[in-house]
Image (spheres, rainbow, N blue to C red):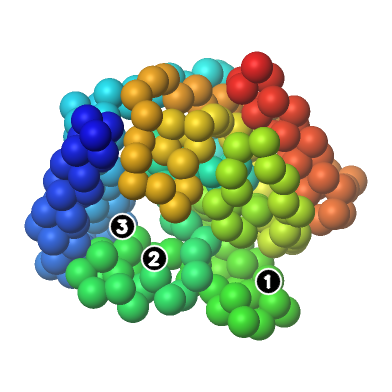
């Protein structure tokens, strides 16, 4: 019961914060992207702090030395909503690849749209991959990190799902390196569950993966191998 009450308290705080922060994205739209990103990303800062207060969920980051100076493509394991918060504090500034339906959510979608995400149409595979490559190349040239969850959806711990090739295609076409990220957030913040368990989440940032002399399939496979192996080591 206590875990339930703590988890509900977190969601109440998150909703209130969203209602307050999202309109700022519209008001701040005339500002340059980096200033706008700073303002909107305070939503993630608050939620990570509130998560610690309410649910006693903390996190640590290993492998920061692997983060290059220039923006790259970040391909991250997707187990929960936690990583969408934490990554905002690690790779700055960033844009997401997400389904366009999220932009239609009242209030939340407004703030999300102001962050210039690559909003794809998941009903059209060819069109979505074209969007990822074309818009991704443009965002990288502008100095933004590209955040991609290659599984396409949240996957429970100890479960596997085929990695989609969009990130590998973007890396091959743009020549941008890939930074793989593994974590065990799903153990404490399970998908499709209100309950959050107290504990420490480990985020591991891997060595840069270069696209040189590789095609999209080879890049994606190398990323998948590193992430899945690392996740197993974290959860031992």
Residue 33: which numbered mark, if any?
3
Residue 116: which numbered mark, if any?
2
Residue at (65% x, 29% y) in the render: 231
Q: Identify the residue under disc 1.
A: 129
Horizontal side of residue 176 vs 138, given as left or right: right
Residue 127, x across and y down, in percent: 66, 81
Cα distance between the residues tagged 2 and 1 = 17 Å
Residue at (15% x, 46% y) in the render: 13
- Image quarter (top left, top right, bottom left or bottom right) of the C terminus: top right
Task: Please identify, in this view, whether the residue under mark 3 or under mark 1 is nearer the observer.
Answer: 1
Cα distance between the residues tagged 3 and 1 = 24 Å
Residue at (51% x, 27% y) in the render: 203
Upstream in sequence: badge 3 or badge 1: 3
Q: Quadrant of residue 229?
A: top right
- Image quarter (top left, top right, bottom left or bottom right) of the N terminus: top left
Horizontal side of residue 166 vs 44, given as left or right: right
């Amino acid at each position: 019961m206590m875990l339930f009450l703590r988890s509900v308290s977190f969601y109440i705080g998150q909703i209130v914060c969203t209602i307050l922060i999202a309109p700022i994205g519209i008001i701040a739209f005339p500002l340059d992207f980096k200033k706008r990103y700073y303002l909107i990303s305070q939503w993630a800062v608050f939620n990570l702090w509130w998560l610690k207060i309410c649910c006693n969920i903390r996190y640590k980051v290993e492998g920061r030395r692997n983060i290059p100076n220039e923006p790259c493509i970040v391909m991250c394991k997707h187990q929960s909503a936690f990583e969408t918060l934490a990554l905002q504090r690690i790779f700055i500034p960033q844009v997401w690849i997400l389904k366009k339906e999220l932009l239609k959510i009242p209030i939340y979608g407004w703030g999300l749209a102001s962050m210039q995400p690559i909003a794809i149409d998941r009903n059209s595979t060819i069109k979505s991959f074209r969007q990822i490559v074309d818009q991704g190349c443009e965002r990288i040239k502008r100095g933004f990190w590209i955040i991609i969850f290659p599984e396409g959806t949240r996957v429970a711990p100890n479960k596997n799902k085929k990695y989609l090739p969009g990130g590998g295609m973007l890396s091959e076409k743009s020549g941008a390196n890939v930074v793989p990220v593994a974590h065990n957030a799903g153990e404490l913040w399970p998908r499709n569950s209100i309950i959050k368990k107290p504990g420490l989440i480990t985020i591991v940032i891997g060595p840069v993966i270069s696209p040189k002399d590789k095609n999209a399939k080879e890049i994606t496979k190398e990323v998948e191998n590193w992430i899945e192996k690392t996740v197993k080591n974290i959860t031992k």
